[in-house]
Image (tube, helix red, strand yellow):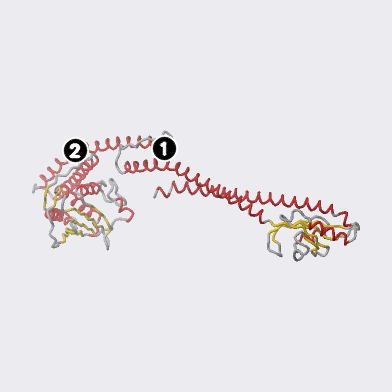
Amino acid sequence: MNKHNSLRSRWLSNMVIIFCILGLVCIVLIGVTFTMYYYANMRADMKARASQASQFFGSYVGQNYDDYYQSCVTYAKNFELSNNMELQFINAEGVLVTSSYGHWAGSSPSTPEIAGAINSRENDDFVGINPDTGEHIIAISCPMIYSNGEVVGVLRYVTSTRLVNLQIVYILLTALVVFALLLAVLILSSTHYIRSIVVPVGEITQKAKKIANGSYGAQIQKAYNDEIGELVDTINDMSIKISRNEKMQADFISSLSHELRTPLTAINGWSETLLGDENLDEQTARGMKIISKEAERLTEMVVDLLDFTRLQDNRLTLNVEQADIRAEFEDTVYMYSSRLSQDGIHLECLDNDDEIPMIACDCKRLRQVFLNILDNAAKHGREGGRIEASMSYEKGMVVVRIRDFGPGIPEDELPLVKKKFYKGSSKTRGTGIGLAVCDEIVDMHGGTLTLENAPGGGTLVTIQLPDTQ
């Protein structure tokens, strides 16, 4: 998993999402608040002016219509706020009588508050889009009533909300700019803070991986005295303890292996001596063969254990010299084929015309690798009854291939089979360290050892060795 796609991205995305949600909520609240504030002030101011005007005209309403009409025209003509709003006088039929914008400023308005004021005999207002012009307006209509109770018309104040809306938009844009600046500050500060966590955690992860891969005893430099520092102390302590345990384990295995070699040598020697006695009855000879075979298998395990301890302590060395690798390989196959034939397994060495060059190698160690892989092929691919071995020269590399015809290796276990002590789902007896030792020996020669499932079944082991060192 990519660390840049985990902690850092999750932290930033969560912080940004939360901050954006809160910011947008705040901006919406600011917009709603200022809209309500400005609109409420405009409506209150217009209602107050309408009430004052209606009271002023109360004395004229009781006179004849001509005097009332002339008073309306004069008042509208001298209206001081014509630049900000329009004053209209509308008769009881909803027809425009006069306006501060001119005697016949336009068609009669059709907003619903006019009829509402006439019918209810009380002030009424309208906020919305003027159906005649499509403009956003606020309108206040105040009924004009004769002394006999008859509604003679409506005094109407109307103004555009364009400037107010622009002011609200400006406020919202300012809020967005402030929000963007705060978001940038948040991202920068969060990035710095996350970096102070991600970088040390990344270093700890790399060191922990090295420890997990076998660098026991490695220490992580402590740079903080907080929770990260406590984690570093814990991993360092764990690394030291694992290193001590590994050293104790390696010492014990090495000591035990050396102690086992002496009695095993005696068992192998005496079993061979006794098998050479022609007077042994059949059952005793059979038992001695079993003893000899099991002692030989145990000796091979002891050798693997000794090599493993050398590998753990970096004491596994090579005695390199120029050698005929083809002769070494063919001798190993020929020697091992006679042993496998006793178990009913046919080991076939596939010939080719490739000229195999001399290479610098440790013949003893490579022979150990060949034998170990052939032994694994015999144990795990026994039911196939056949093993194929070949050597070729390809692109400057000596390539050895050994294939069995058994059940193969489960795909999920292929990446793990070369790890020490790993045996997987196989029920075949073994220590689980042979392939780990072989892989290390091949790697020390500058080569590679790979395992894969062969087409048609079975396991294919490929060893590639460079022709120069």
Q: From this viewpoint, which residue is outermost toward the top?
A: 225
Residue 99 point in image, percent of width and height: 77, 60
Quadrant hosting residue 270: top left
The amino acid type found where label 1 is placed reads Ile
Indicate the secondary structure of the residue bearing disc 1: helix
Residue 301 point in image, percent of width and height: 21, 45
- Front-most of 432 and 245? 245
Quadrant hosting residue 117: bottom right
Tell me if 206 is positioned left or right of 439 in this view.
Answer: right
Residue matched to label 1: 228
Residue under the point 71% across and 65% down:
132
Indicate the secondary structure of the residue bearing disc 2: helix
- Front-most of 312 and 175? 175
Nearest to viewer (mark 2 / mark 1): 1
Residue 233 point in image, percent of width and height: 38, 34
- Label 2 vs 1, first from the N-terminus: 1
Residue under the point 19% across and 39% down:
260
Rounded to the nearest whole Å, what is the CA distance between mark 2 and mark 1?
44 Å
Tell me if 332 is positioned left or right of 241 in this view.
Answer: left
The amino acid type found where label 2 is placed reads His
Are the two marked residues, 2 and 1, in contact with CB atoms closer than 8 angstroms? no
Residue under the point 80% across and 65% down:
95
Residue 284 showing in the rendered view: no
User: Compared with residue 153, is residue 367 higher up or lower down, i.e. above or below?
Assistant: above
Residue under the point 33% across and 54% down:
412
Residue 261 point in image, percent of width and height: 17, 40
Residue matched to label 2: 258
